[in-house]
């Protein structure tokens, strides 16, 4: 059943990330393996795709798509601060580097943490 993207993802980790960014960020988007950058209110059909099983080439192409989508929305990336609350598959294949090359600041609060430590980080921020 179609629903807003912010309600489509139901994993405990996504829910903790969502609560964190709702409190700490002025605006936020969802990084979708299928659609790229998605506004949280965009209505989507459920899907089963992740970047964790995608090839390096597919991840790089996805990163280029997201950078184009961000540029279309924001006009320029320079001067913006982006917090990335996603796994390495979503930022290590060109997204972080592309943002930084465009003059943006990239922060990844849980980079390098195990799943348990990531969950603890988000849980302790409330």
Image (spheres, rainbow, N blue to C red):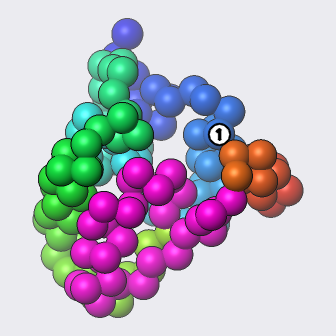
Tally the marks.
1
Q: Which quadrant does the N terminus fall into?
A: top left
**Could you say which is closer to the camera, residue 19 or residue 84?**
84
Which class describes the residues within 10 Å of circle 1: few (<14), some (14-19), or many (20+)?
some
Q: Left of 74 or right of it: where is 116?
A: right
Q: Is residue 36 above or below residue 96?
A: above
User: In x, y percent, where is residue 68?
Assistant: 14, 63
User: In x, y percent, where is residue 13?
Assistant: 65, 39
User: In x, y percent, where is residue 27?
Assistant: 46, 62
Residue 66 visible in image = no
**Could you say which is closer to the camera, residue 111 or residue 125?**
111
User: In x, y percent, where is residue 49?
Assistant: 33, 28
Q: Is residue 80 above or below residue 26?
A: below
Q: Is residue 107 magenta?
A: yes
Q: Which residues are magenta?
A: 84-113
Residue at (18% x, 70% y) in the render? 71
Quarter of image, res 60: bottom left
Q: Left of 67 or right of it: where is 86?
A: right
Q: Which quadrant does the C terminus fall into?
A: bottom right
Residue at which label 1 appears: 13
Q: Is residue 1 above or below residue 87?
A: above
Residue at (29% x, 89% y) in the render? 103
Residue at (20% x, 81% y) in the render? 76
């Amino acid at each position: 059943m179609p629903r807003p993207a912010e309600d489509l993802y139901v994993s405990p980790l996504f829910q903790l990330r969502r609560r964190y960014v709702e409190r700490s960020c002025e605006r936020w988007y969802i990084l979708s393996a299928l659609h790229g950058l998605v506004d949280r209110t965009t209505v989507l059909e459920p899907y089963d795709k992740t970047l964790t099983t995608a090839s390096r080439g597919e991840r790089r192409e996805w990163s280029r798509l997201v950078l184009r989508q961000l540029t279309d929305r924001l006009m320029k990336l320079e001067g913006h601060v982006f917090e990335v609350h996603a796994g390495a598959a979503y930022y290590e294949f060109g997204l972080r580097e592309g943002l930084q090359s465009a003059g943006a600041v990239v922060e990844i609060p849980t980079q390098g943490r195990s799943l348990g430590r990531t969950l603890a980080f988000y849980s302790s921020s409330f």
